[in-house]
Image (cartoon, grey):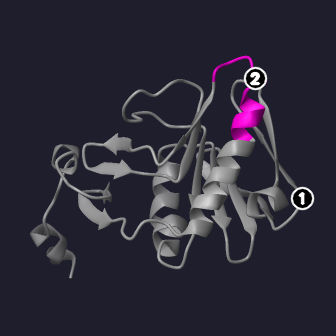
Amino acid sequence: MALAKEYLPYYTVEDYKLWEGDWELIEGIPYAMAPSPFGVHQKITFNLGYEIKKQLENCSDKCNVYIELDWIVSDDTVLRPDLIVICKEILEYLKETPEIVVEVVSKSTAKKDEHIKYEIYEREKVPYYVMAYPEIKKLRVFHLENGKYEKYFDSDDGILEIQLKNGCLLKIEVERIFK
């Protein structure tokens, strides 16, 4: 079946920019992002973004939180993480590796978030990959160490601490994210 891939359509970022609707493009293959995320998904994304943004205001460097910003990873890959943190201002598309990527995992996105995106984020050297699980009210976090992800935090309570490259320390109370 390996030959089948050569017969599949292959798309690039230039194709992606012309599409209507919400899509991700992963190694030339389009993935529809419909329907839009459920209310619980949106609430968790907002809560995480709000908690991080409050703490970033006290940092010396200007770091920003972006929700559903397209990240052009390569000519054939465009991802739209639920939330990213990067210590610079992005005016259009993200074209470099963010410091934190957050995905809110649902039944319909679990395979992509836990496997496909995990591998891409690790390959692209995202320092922290946070997966939020609404159904079990849990955060699972991976930290990049020596080019590979190591489980850093996996809990439904407590405080997640993330040290950004600029020295800022984020402290996220897990229960506040899911209330």
Q: Mark 1 points at which residue?
A: 158
Q: In which quarter of the image is residue 75?
A: top left
Counting from the top left corner in percent of width and height, residue 21 is at 27, 58
Q: From what the image shows, is residue 35 above or below residue 158? A: below
Q: From what the image shows, is residue 104 above or below residue 59? A: below
Q: Mark 2 points at which residue?
A: 59
Q: What residue type is labelled 2?
A: Cys
Q: In which quarter of the image is residue 91?
A: top left
Q: Which of 105 and 113 is in front in this view?
A: 105
Counting from the top left corner in percent of width and height, residue 50 is at 69, 43
Counting from the top left corner in percent of width and height, residue 18 is at 16, 48
Q: Which of 128 and 102 is in front in this view?
A: 102
Left or right of 19? Residue 65 is right
Given contact means CB atoms under 8 Å apart, are the residues at marks 2 and 1 in contact? no
Give the residue displayed 39% in from the left and 34% down from the top: 95
Where's the C terminus, which quadrant?
Answer: bottom right
Q: What residue type is labelled 1?
A: Gly
Span highlighted in magenta in the image: 52-62
Q: In which quarter of the image is residue 8?
A: bottom left
